[in-house]
Image (cartoon, grey):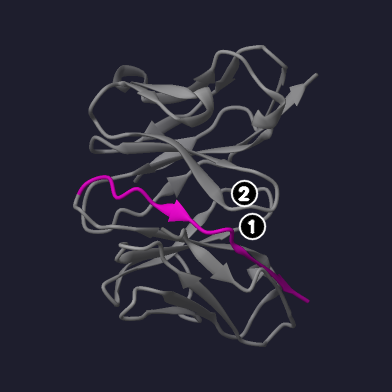
């Protein structure tokens, strides 16, 4: 059983560019959540996808968007990058049961915006 | 609204000493509570979770936490610290429902001195 994987590991972009981050969920999981973790902070919820539909969104602007594919992998897209978007982006997968739905995290993608 | 407060952004203990990391939560409904650990430049690893069963929860690596409703607390403890326990520890809360997003504390950095 493979765990959650994310790509790329590191990424450097300039202000105004667009970026796509990718996440492969753990085998058997149908839900993917994305979080942004700024340096020295706790993660902040961006959005969640359940069976290819957005299932909740945090306080992030529309330039943060996502997709979930039939195999439950997911992408996070960020348009018009700003300096404050520099952070560790974490993907977590889970299996929605209506209960605790423990989330398992990938290693993250470190995005630096210059 | 849910929130999580972790008292003490930095905790330092000697190897072999008791580890106590504090977490208080606010939630309008019975919560699910989690402790995660994050090693440098890595993602988040689940230590343990509270799911309204036993109030004393045992996790990996010798950690445990006790849910105290009257104190709205979920403190993490380990009887004897090991050098390998040095990491960032995050407490998180979620509510049952359609979107079980995690709300996170700011984290506590644990240093273990020889």
Residue under pointer 1? A38
Q: Residue at x 53, y 53 (%)?
A: A43
Position of the C terminus of chain A by quadrant:
bottom right
Give the quadrant of residue A100: top left
Residue B69, percent across and down?
A: 30, 22
Determine the chain carrying the residue at label 1: A
Mark-to-mark CA distance, 1 and 2: 5 Å
Residue at the spot of label 2 = A41
Residue B31 falls in image quadrant:
top left
Q: Nearer the viewer, residue A6 or B3?
A: A6
Question: Residue B29 got which mark?
Answer: none
Left or right of B94 on screen, residue A84 = right
**Magenta residues?**
A99-114
B38 relative to B92 in the view: left or right: right
Name the chain letter of the residue that bears numbered label 2: A
Q: Are marks 1 and 2 in contact (CB under 8 Å)?
A: yes
């Amino acid at each position: 059983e493979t765990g959650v994987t994310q790509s790329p590991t590191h990424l450097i972009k300039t202000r105004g560019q667009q970026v796509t981050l990718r996440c492969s969920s753990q085998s058997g999981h149908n839900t993917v959540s994305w979080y942004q973790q700024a340096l020295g902070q706790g993660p902040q919820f961006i959005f969640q996808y359940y069976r290819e539909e957005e299932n909740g969104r945090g306080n992030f602007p529309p330039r943060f968007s996502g997709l979930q594919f039939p195999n439950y992998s997911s992408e996070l897209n960020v348009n018009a990058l700003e300096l404050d978007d520099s952070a560790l982006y974490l993907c977590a997968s889970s299996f929605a049961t209506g209960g605790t739905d423990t989330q398992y995290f990938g290693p993250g993608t470190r995005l630096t915006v210059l | 609204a849910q929130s999580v407060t972790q008292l003490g952004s930095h905790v330092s203990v000697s190897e072999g000493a008791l580890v106590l990391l504090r977490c208080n939560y606010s939630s309008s409904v019975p919560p699910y509570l989690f402790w995660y650990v994050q090693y440098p430049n890595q993602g988040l690893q689940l230590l343990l979770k509270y799911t309204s069963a036993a109030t004393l929860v045992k996790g990996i690596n010798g950690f445990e936490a006790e849910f105290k409703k009257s104190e709205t607390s979920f403190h993490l403890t380990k009887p004897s610290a090991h050098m390998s326990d040095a990491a960032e520890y995050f407490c998180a809360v979620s509510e049952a429902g359609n979107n079980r997003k995690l709300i996170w504390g700011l984290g506590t950095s644990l240093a273990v001195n020889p």
